[in-house]
Amino acid sequence: MKFGKSIGILGVAAAGILLGACTAGGDNQGLEYAPQMYHSVAYEPLTQITDETQGDWLSNREDGKGEFYNSNIYNPHNMNMREPVANTVPRTKDGYLPYRLKAFELEEAALIENPVELTDAVLDEGETLYIQYCSTCHGKGGEGDGKAGEIIGGVANLKGGAYINLPEGHIFHVITKGKGRMGAHGSQITPESRWKIVHYVKQEIQKQ
């Protein structure tokens, strides 16, 4: 009986020691499960570590290097990003140049040509996008009679007056930056989708 009690006390003591050993504090961070989840291998511009053995006691990286090694050996001077080629302009992932015209620069916008090739598939997509984003105000037929347009008032009738002769770049610009009561939709619709809407407006709504 006494022996069993002693074993029990020793077991509790051992468990307490083990639990105490797992605590972290001060410079002792304790033991980590899956350390790669805590120490991501990231390129730090100001704190690059070039010694491949740094943190090897902790590492389980597939490349066999230490956990803290984070230097980029492939770029000059260990830079993590190459400098852009002189006199070049970055394009978006779709290949478009950055759209930097201000909301009031309508004349400059009017000179921009639609970069999206006109096809039946593009018109079908343009119709879907128009119904999704534009018909609420402009109406399904573009006459400014959408449900929201009736309440707001002053919505453009895309079939009437000067709107018929608006250049495609002008329409794209207004969709992007907004005009009058129409808010900017550049953050909601991708550039390619905006150009598809322009094709649909010109070809199907305005019949040009």
Image (cartoon, rainbow, N blue to C red):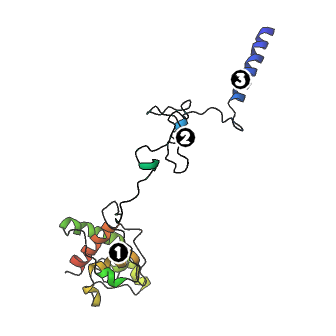
Which residue occupies the foreground of this view, 41 or 182? Answer: 41
Q: Which residue is mark 2?
A: 39
Task: Judge whether 12 appears above or below 152 on screen.
Answer: above
Disc 1 to disc 2, C-alpha distance: 47 Å
Q: Amino acid at mark 2?
A: His
Disc 2 to disc 3, C-alpha distance: 29 Å
Badge 1 crowding class, 10 Å Cα cut-off, few under 14, some 14 to 19, many 20 or more, is some
Badge 2 crowding class, 10 Å Cα cut-off, few under 14, some 14 to 19, many 20 or more, is few
Task: Report if residue 170 is visible in the image.
Answer: no
- Tell me the element at label 1: loop
Could you say which disc has been placed on residue 15 in the image?
3
Q: Residue furthest bottom?
A: 161
Residue 163 in the image: state x and y as whole percent: 29, 86
Image quadrant where residue 185 sits:
bottom left
Between circles 2 and 3, the one closer to the viewer is: 2
Among numbered discs 2 and 3, the one appearing first in the sequence: 3
Q: Amino acid at mark 3?
A: Ala
- Tell me the element at label 2: loop
Disc 3 to disc 1, C-alpha distance: 68 Å
Which residue occupies the foreground of this view, 203 or 153? Answer: 203
The residue drawn where x is 50% and y is 35% is 52
Q: Which residue is mark 1?
A: 134
Badge 3 crowding class, 10 Å Cα cut-off, few under 14, some 14 to 19, many 20 or more, is few
Among numbered discs 3 and 1, the one appearing first in the sequence: 3
- Tell me the element at label 3: helix
* Quadrant of the rendering where the C terminus is positioned: bottom left
Left/right placement of residue 179 relative to residue 121 reads right
The residue drawn where x is 25% and y is 86% is 165
Residue 6 in the image: state x and y as whole percent: 78, 13
The residue drawn where x is 29% and y is 71% is 195
Left/right placement of residue 29 relative to residue 45 reads right
